[in-house]
Image: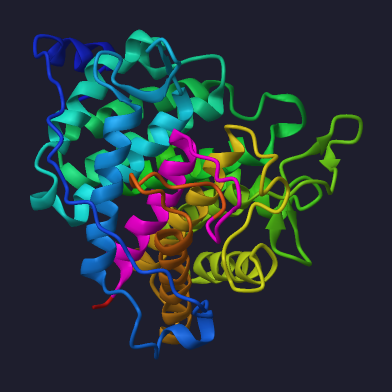
Amino acid sequence: MHISLRHILVSLSAAALTSSVVEAIPTKIQRASEFSFLAKRASSKDSLTRADFQNYASSAINALQKTYWNAPSGLWGSYDSSGKFSPHWWPSANVLTMMANYYGKYPTTATWMPDLFATILTHAPAYAKGFLNDYYDDELWWVLAWIQVYDATGNEIYLNTAAAIYEDPKSVYGNTPCGGLCVENELYLTASAKLANRLPARKNSEGQGYYYSQALIAYDFLITNTTTSMNPSTHLFNDGISMNTCKNNGKIVFTYNQGIILSGLTELTWSTRSHSYTALAVEIANSVIEKMTTSAGILQEKACEPNACNGDEQQFKGVFTRNLAFMINRATGMDADVLAKYRDFLALNAESIIRDDTSSDNMLGLVWSGANKPVYSVETDGSALDTLVGAAITALN
């Protein structure tokens, strides 16, 4: 039965829910004089464990809630000197995704999170009715967030919410100039593939999978039509199109352009049982680790770090690490050595964040290898937390 988003929101509106954040014990890690390189990390006796990463993530989540969460709006954002709150809309969807990712693995350590999820569903639409605004990429971030909440809780109200939001970008997909930017297409592919695997019974008028067919259309645009999307020699996407030619402008490459699609390709492997999608995801991930990191193996937004990243760009790296973690845990057909490499990459970056990019009050900064003048925001916090959570949920011990 199709359930409208309005019906979903009305069903929760009677409950005035607020999150009661469980206090986590702030923790510290001793700064090391030398950096643990990726090749050495697996054999290091000083490497952190899954329990360590979970503990640090819990402490940082607690600090994030105290600093950036606003229960009346159901969103995260910033406060000015007078205490006025400004919501950060699409970053809130990403923080919600991170929270659900954590809760799905460690529910007993965050028993307050189901109330948080319900609060957001009830109150956030006051900012944008039905989670819809003038930006289809924003809407698709919220689709992915509610899918993750569904995965973590099993509550179908969140899956129905995701499906309801999805209808707006679907209604215009393929009609935008030059087919749209890379990020919108990647988000659409990933949202379509995830919904296809969770709502497989829904069919289109031709009897095909309603969501699956859309995922394949987006895949064809992104991968087959390489003049507008992926550079086949580097396996990296950039987000710019020349509107005169509808061809890739070959300019800035951001980490999130590479991250969004990883889980979408993983989902397509589930749908088709073809490992070609996973193989492509591995090529993309390997290219990021090779080309978009420091000499020590720490992920870097090379286009703007250390001090020129705007608020949106401060969110980007976590999108890559979050989706890399998803691929580690869910992909099939990946070699054990590739999985080990990716686990070590997440652990290496998480350890660097803890050691070199965490303030005394557990705020997490932009530059994961450390900066002379750290930048802290809800976006840097959420992004770094994606990495801590990713390390916690993928570590083997």
The residue closer to the viewer here, 296 or 166, is 296
| Position above or below: 73 against 232 | above
Residue 127 image-quadrant placement: top left
The residue closer to the viewer here, 309 or 267, is 309
Residue 363 locus on image (x, y percent)? 39, 44
Magenta region's main secondary structure? helix
**In this picture, residue 72 sits left or right of residue 257:** left
Residue 189 locus on image (x, y percent)? 52, 44
**In this picture, residue 270 sits left or right of residue 4:** right
Residue 35 locus on image (x, y percent)? 52, 76
Is any part of residue 76 visible from this angle?
yes
Whether the magenta-drawn stretch holds residue 393 is answered as yes
| Position above or below: 176 against 56 | above
Residue at image coords 75%, 65%: 234
Is any part of residue 207 visible from this angle?
no
Residue at image coords 27%, 33%: 65
The residue closer to the viewer here, 324 or 37, is 37
Residue 295 image-quadrant placement: bottom right
Question: In the picture, which quadrant includes the C terminus?
Answer: bottom left
Residue at image coords 38%, 50%: 385
Question: In the picture, which quadrant includes the N terminus?
Answer: top left
Residue 72 image-quadrant placement: top left
Q: How is the image coloured?
A: rainbow
Residues in magenta, as a range: 368-395
Whether the magenta-drawn stretch holds residue 86 is answered as no
Residue at image coords 44%, 83%: 41
Question: For the view shown, which residue lies furthest in the right direction?
Answer: 244
**In this picture, residue 261 sits left or right of residue 69:** right
Residue 391 locus on image (x, y percent)? 35, 65
